[in-house]
Image (cartoon, rainbow, N blue to C red):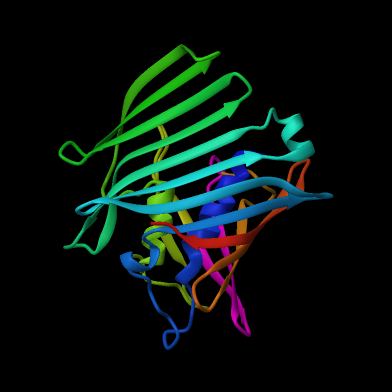
Amino acid sequence: MKKKLIILIIFILGCSNLLFSKSNIKFLTLDNITGESLKYRFSFFIFRKAAVVKLNFKHIKDNLFEATLKGQTKGVVGMFTAFRKDIYISKMFYDNNSKRLIPYEFTKMTQIGSKIRKSIYKFDYKKNVIIKTKEKYKNSKLTSKKVYEIKINPPVDDYLTLAYNFRLGVFGFPDKNHSLKIKVLPEKKKKQRFIEIFFIKEKKDKIKLKAKIVKDIVKTKRNEVYGIITKDMLPVKGILPGVPIFGDIKAYLIALQYLN
């Protein structure tokens, strides 16, 4: 379940400046997102606080930046999932020529009890490959390690870099007649994967969006995610409908602050 929560939060974060009419669209800048910290609460069925996810974006030095996502299940759901933790870390640089963030290392880690699964993606743009390292730990001891290469056709973003590039306006925006199809991080022996984003409706100060996501990222009845954003480009709600066993999983923004 937690992987689905993570994908949901990345989607609503990334779509925060898409799909406005051309007269209203206002893309963000690095200054807008640097130091930003967002906190989301997830719920399903009777569980109002099934998990909490925090997202931070910070400047490291020069043109280097880092985005971090940390999530953990809570309460009764936490008890039944061994208080599962998920961490995504994206290290990237800003390219002034293309006006976009470009990842050079992406890490995702899941901890359930004493077991840890970690994947590290290192981008080699001279060879146009990603060097992926998969590790498994139990009781802090390494039990398995695999290293292999994945061919890429740049630009290719990891999930977090893709989300922030959305907000910077790198991919433009879809409208009522045209969707937006974007490459997503490939995996071993998988064809190039895409996320396709559609405009649903605009009501007062909010916009509703839909994304079609490939099956190996999220498995629901229709592999769809919905997001709701305000016109000041703040993602406030996400919905992952029809998740087996859990039903509809929802995410709500509960805190926004800026860190030094």
Residue at x 50%, y 59% (from the top left corner): 13
Q: Provide the residue span drawn in magenta.
A: 196-217
**Mainly helix, strand or loop, the magenta region?**
strand
Asked whether 211 or 81 is in front, the reply is 81
Is residue 242 visible to us here? yes
Most extreme residue toward the front, as rendered?
Answer: 260
Residue at x 44%, y 20% (from the top left corner): 135
Q: Does residue 8 appear left or right of residue 249 in this picture?
A: left
* Image height of 229 relative to 94, above or below: below
Percent across and percent down for residue 232 are: 50, 77
> Split into 4 quadrants, where in the image is the C terminus?
bottom left
| Magenta region includes residue 71 | no
Most extreme residue toward the bottom, as rendered?
Answer: 23
* Image height of 26 relative to 258, above or below: below
Asked whether 192 or 142 is in front, the reply is 142
Percent across and percent down for residue 131 are: 29, 30
Is residue 248 visible to us here? no
Quadrant for residue 51, please give it.
top right
* Image height of 107 relative to 212, above or below: above
Asked whether 245 or 102 is in front, the reply is 102
